Image (cartoon, grey):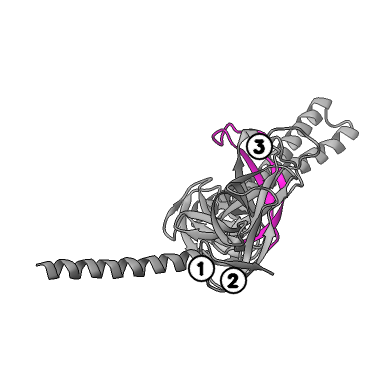
Amino acid sequence: MKTYIYSSLILSAVLFSSCSQDDKKSVQNTDAPISVTVDQSTTNSTGSSATATGKLVARNSVNVSTRMMGYITSMRGEVGQNVTVGQPLVSINSTDIQAKGGQANAQISQAQASFNIAKKDYERFQNLYKNQSASQKELDDMRARYEMAQAGLHAARQMKNEVNSQYKYTNITAPISGTITAKFADQGDMASPGMPLLTIESSGTLQAQVLVSEKDITMINQGMSVQVTLKSINKTISGTVSEIGKSATTTGGQYMVKINIPASKELLPGMFVNVQFPFKNSGKTNQDFQESIMVPKSALVENGQLTGVYVVSSQNTAVLRWLKIGKTFGDEVEVLSGLNAKESYIISANGKLYNGAKIQIK
């Protein structure tokens, strides 16, 4: 029993001695210093900014519909199809229009015959009146009859024009060049006046449409340059504010802002966007205009939901500093807390950094 106790004490002493030596080695940290490059945080004093989300829409979008009721006999448009101006898309049964056209033709023939007779009678009575063979009343009656026949012929022709104008709604063509993005009916369906059949959006001319809160809308101006970020394709492009909504009645208390962006084959209608509106200081003393600390994304260290940077301690060691991150401005991010202005931080290293690692600044 005593031998066992003595053995345990000896083993514990050996382990304690070993741990003490490891701790001493860790504290002394005899590893070679890691060569690093440092930089200082910059400040953005141009002013505050606002961000808004929305989506890309075609600058020119048209709903194709008809003014007449009838069965769709042909549907040549499909979603995703590229069309040109004047290309046939939809045909609607025109039996009723054809019948009305026949009636209009018959009325024109009848009115033309009546007009011809009235014209001849009027010319005859003019000659009789000159030869004093007809009275003034008879001439007036013939003139009235002639004018009524002339008006009847004009009305019949206008009815024919109305029928002809309806014919173009039985054979619908593309009003603009673009891409069919929506289809609301198929062959055999009943078309109704005003019912949309297809939606065509012009290709290559897109706008970003976002909703902006009332506290920011007054600082947005037409022609302002903004940054438009599309996370789906990991791309940021420049845009220009082209239209600012002046009412929020139908948009839930927010104001619609439209931004023109350059054409690109990568961009498609419906893509979600994040737009950043920069607000310049211009010497204002508004509390919203505060200097913000900016660091590049490449210097950030992420661990789960935590984000930080390595800073340089007074003993020339790397110290991991956790940060509170704000908005993103291109390749830089805003630091809300955790880093002081002009404080140095490590942007690159020739080895793996860890908390307490010895460093050597290049």
Q: Residue furthest right?
A: 130
Name the residue located 90 percent from the left edge and 34 percent from the top edge: 130
Q: Is residue 344 left or right of residue 307?
A: right
Residue placed most toward the observer, 335 or 8 = 8
**Viewer-proximal residue among 189 and 135:** 189
The quarter of the displayed image where residue 291 is located: top right
Question: Compared with residue 161, is residue 129 higher up or lower down, i.e. above or below?
Answer: above
Mark 2 element type: loop
Question: Of callouts 3 and 2, which one flags the residue occurring earlier in the amino acid sequence?
Answer: 2
The amino acid type, in three-letter code, at marker 1 is Asn
Q: Is residue 165 visible?
A: no
Give the distance between the C-alpha atoms of the residues marked 3 and 2, in whole angstroms: 49 Å
The residue beneath circle 3 is 216
How packed mark 1 is, by other alpha carbons closer than 10 Å (few <14, some 14-19, many 20 or more), is few
The location of residue 95, given as percent across then percent down, is: 49, 55
**Residue 220 visible in the picture:** yes
Whole-percent x, y for residue 157 in the image: 68, 46
Q: Residues within 10 Å of mark 3 (few under 14, many from 20)?
A: some
Query: In this picture, which residue range is highlighted in magenta?
Result: 235-263
Q: CA distance from mark 3 to mark 1?
A: 53 Å
Which quadrant of the structure image shows residue 178?
bottom right
Which of discs 2 and 1 lies nearer the camera? The answer is 1
Residue type for callout 3: Asp
Q: Residue at x 82, y 40 (%)?
A: 123
Q: Amino acid type of disc 2?
A: Pro
Query: Toward the viewer: 47 or 205?
Result: 47
The residue that disc 2 covers is 33
Q: Quadrant of the C terminus?
A: bottom right
Residue indicated by mark 1: 29
- Category of crowding for the residue at label 2, using alpha-carbon neighbours closer than 10 angstroms: few (below 14), some (14–19), many (at least 20): some
Tag 2 and tag 1, C-beta contact below 8 Å: no
